[in-house]
Amino acid sequence: MAAADTGLFNRDAHADWIRLRTLIVLRWIAIAGQIIAIAVGQLVFDLNMPLGFCYLAVGASVIANLIAMFVFPENKRLGERELALMILFDIAQLSFLIFLTGGLNNPFALLVLAPVTISATVLGLRSTVILGLVALILTSVLALYYVPLRTDDGFVLQMPQIFVFGFWAAITIGVVFISGYVHRVSAEMLAMSEALLATQMALAREQKLTDLGGVVAAAAHELGTPLATIKLVSAELMDELQDRSEQHQDAQLIREQADRCREILRSMGRAGKEDLHLQMTPLESVLREAAEPHSDRGIKISYDISPSIGADQRQPVISRKPEIIHGLRNLVQNAVDFAREAVWVDAHWSNDQIVLRITDDGPGFPLHLIGRIGDPFVRRRRSREHRKARPEYEGMGLGLFIAKTLLERTSAKLAFSNGSDPYDHPTLPGERRGAIVEVQWDRAILEPQKSSPTGALGANRKIEI
């Protein structure tokens, strides 16, 4: 929400979200409704209204719509400033029309909530507050000053003052409550949408890296045999062409280039020579791969990977899923960000479950935020000490949200807690009393096919191109 609330008419907050054509269609619907209401009031209920001024107010909306249709292209998208000005015009036009038709004695005064609701849905907080204040001020003026509604017989249609006050109070409460409620919900939806987009991008990046490694390893494996054949044939040609210097040099060049191709493929496939090794890997390898980018940031990362009491001693060989790698990497990054000296990565397994705990010696999670951990864009004020210690850190909870979302896609269960009370005596560096993140899987999900006791993965499947 912080980015959306930087100021009134901020062009960058929600720019280019709403099509101009959408607002034009909505305004035509409102214009048709206003004309029908005026006609019904005059012809059916014999109301004596200042029709000239009423149709002048409606005509202003018609002219504004025509200008928008002919001046701007159909695919025009409105920025924050443009959208706010259009909504401000609609509020003023509707208020003027209500002023001409009885003020708050007119039940259609409730329609002032419509433009305020649109503002709360798509505009920033400050723009919504100012437009809401404009609507409240105009509504208050309409409660005191207006053109009374009269019938052709001269009878004034007017509610008792207590009902007018109640109507004004209802509209005021509605503007405040509905705009606040809608703005909050739309902000939550926006935050969740942006966070999910970031999650999908992170997962796609990890998946591309995995696929690229598999393709390179498969290419190195499959091209080994033809390159060996080329080398063998070229060696035979060199023996037969000893007395022909030019042909002998050509055969030697072919052999050298074949050797060069083998070296290039060997270096490209050094990360993993067989694609099956990219799909299944021991639990410890996955944990170390996830934590490796943060191992040189000045924080010691310790590992304790062992079976639980009574469990199989063999380490689980699990599916190497991008969701697990990237999710665990974010959890380790969060621990390293707040650790003072050390982070502990503990993994234990039983015959049914695999449990992972990531602990640090930092200050721990704030108690008032533990229940919200895993939500995107959770921010809190940082203390002066924390700003000095981590001047580059601008945590918004997005990393933990991505980690939680990715790991839960693998059927993991996450729990967040502290090793000690952050408001108790401060923890000392090197103590396991900071934040604790526990991740738990059913072993059958991560290890769908248990490897043989020898650890062999079997032959690679042929890649069809």
Image (tube, helix red, strand yellow):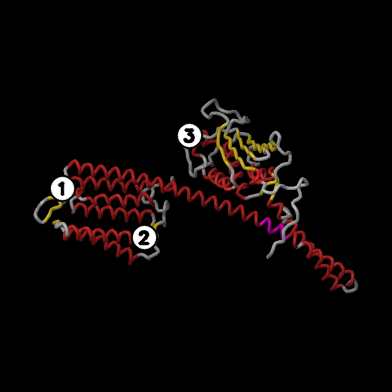
Q: Is tag 3's residue or tag 1's residue first in the polypeptide sequence? A: 1
Mark 3 lies on residue: 368
**Label 3: how many residues lie within 10 Å, few (<14), some (14-19) or many (20+)?**
few
Q: Are marks 2 and 1 in contact (CB under 8 Å)?
A: no
Amino acid residing under circle 3: His
- In percent of width and height, residue 259 lies at 79, 62
Q: Is tag 3's residue or tag 2's residue first in the polypeptide sequence? A: 2
**Label 1: how many residues lie within 10 Å, few (<14), some (14-19) or many (20+)?**
some
Amino acid residing under circle 1: Gln
Cα distance, mark 3 to mark 2? 42 Å
**Under tag 3, what secondary structure?**
helix
Cα distance, mark 2 to mark 1? 37 Å
Cα distance, mark 3 to mark 1? 52 Å
Q: Say left or right for 234 vs 441.
A: right
**Which residue sits at x=21%, y=48%?**
104
Which callout, 2 or 1, points to the residue nearer the camera?
1
**Which residue sits at x=41%, y=46%?**
185
Looking at the rendering, the stretch of residues picked out in magenta corresponds to 212-219
Residue at the extreme right of the image, as rendered: 243
- Residue 103 falls inside the magenta stretch: no
Amino acid residing under circle 2: Thr
Mark 1 lies on residue: 158
Given residues 44 and 108, the one toward you in this image is 44
Q: Say left or right for 355 vs 228.
A: left
Given residues 36 and 204, the one toward you in this image is 36
- In percent of width and height, residue 256 lies at 80, 64
